[in-house]
Image (cartoon, helix red, strand yellow):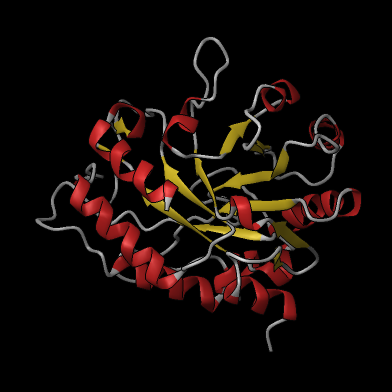
Amino acid sequence: MESRERKLWLGAIALIAVMACGARNCVAGDAANAPRHFAVNGNFDPGGRFVPGDYGFNLADVSSAESLDSLPRDVKGLMWIGTCEGADARFRGLVESVIDHPKLFGFYLMDDPDPSGRWRRPCKAEGLRAESDWIHARRAGIATFVALMNIGTSAAPAFDASLGPDNSHVDLFGIAPYPCRRDWRECDFAMIDRFVEAGRRIGISDAAVVPIYQTFGGGEWRSEGGGYRLPDPEELRRILDLWRERIPHPVFDYAYSWGTQKSDKALATSPPLLDVLKRHNGE
C-alpha cells in the first residue's frame, strides 16, 4: 500500500506540500516550484550566470558551494558526487561543503552505476547505500539520485537488480530511453514504456522515477541503431507527452544534455528544442 505522503504527492501536487519517499528518506517539494527541471552539463556562462534559467530550468548542475551561491532565487542545485566508494573522507568532504546550504536540492551520486565493472569502473550498491545513508543522517529531505545504466538492449531493457531502492537506499532514479537513432527511420517511442517497466521490475515506484529526455545526438556516441540522432521539435514534443502520460508528476525531470559532449549536438545549441522545453517547463 502506498504511503499517505506518496498518495498526496500523486493526487494534489498543485495544491499542497508534497513528498516522495524512498527507502529511508522523504524528499520534500513545494507546489510553487514542482516539478523541478534539470539539464546537465555546462550550466554556467563565463560570468557565472545560470543560463538554463532563461528557458524555465530551475534545478542546476552544480559542483561547489560557490555555484550554489550564484543561483537565482527560485533555483536550487543538484550537487555532483560521482565517487561511489562509500562514505570515505573525499565523499564526506564534498558533502559537508554544501550539506547545510539553503539552495541545495540534493546529490547526484552517480551516472550509469555498473556493479559488474564490465562497462565502467565498478560501482556497487553497497557504496551508494553508504553514501545515501550518510547524507540522510545529516539532513532529512535532501534527495539522493542516480541515473541508471541499461544493461539490456533497447528492445529488452534491464537494470541491475542490486541497485533498487531497498538495497541502495537511493531516493530517485533517472531512467533514460533515448528513442531517436541515426539508422532508424522513426524514433522508437515505445521504448519509454519498456524502460519504465524495467525500473518497476527492480522495485522503482513511479514516484521515484526521474524522466530523462533525449536532447542530444550525433558526435562520437555509439549505440544500437548506429548512434543517437538529435530529435526534431515534433519528436521531442512526442517524447514529453509520452513521459507525461507515464509519470505525470515527477519530483524533477531531466534533459540530457544541456551542454555538448563527444562532439555532439545538444540542447544549448538547438534553438528549436529550446523553444519546446521552455514551453514545457512553463506549464
Q: Quadrant of residue 121?
A: top right
Residue 204, can we see it?
no
Q: Where's residue 99, x and y in %?
A: 83, 38
Image vertical order of residue 157 relative to residue 121, above or below: below
Extreme-left residue of the structure: 185
Q: Residue at x 45, y 61 (%)?
A: 151
Which quadrant holds the N terminus?
bottom right
Image vertical order of residue 72 relative to residue 77, above or below: above
Q: Where's residue 47, x and y in %?
A: 55, 10
Horizontal placement of 254 versus 84: left or right?
A: left
Extreme-front residue of the structure: 15
Image vertical order of residue 73 relative to residue 250, above or below: above
Query: Exactly how many numbered labels are in the figure?
Result: 0
Q: Where's residue 54, x and y in %?
A: 44, 30
Image vertical order of residue 203 relative to residue 116, above or below: below
Residue in front for this viewpoint, 180 or 113: 180
Extreme-right residue of the structure: 138
Extreme-bottom residue of the structure: 1
Q: Quadrant of residue 239?
A: bottom left
Q: Residue at x 81, y 36 (%)?
A: 95
Q: Where's residue 160, x and y in %?
A: 55, 65
Q: Residue at x 21, y 46 (%)?
A: 233
Residue in front for this viewpoint, 169 or 11: 11
Residue in front for this viewpoint, 274 or 83: 274
Residue 242, can we see it?
yes
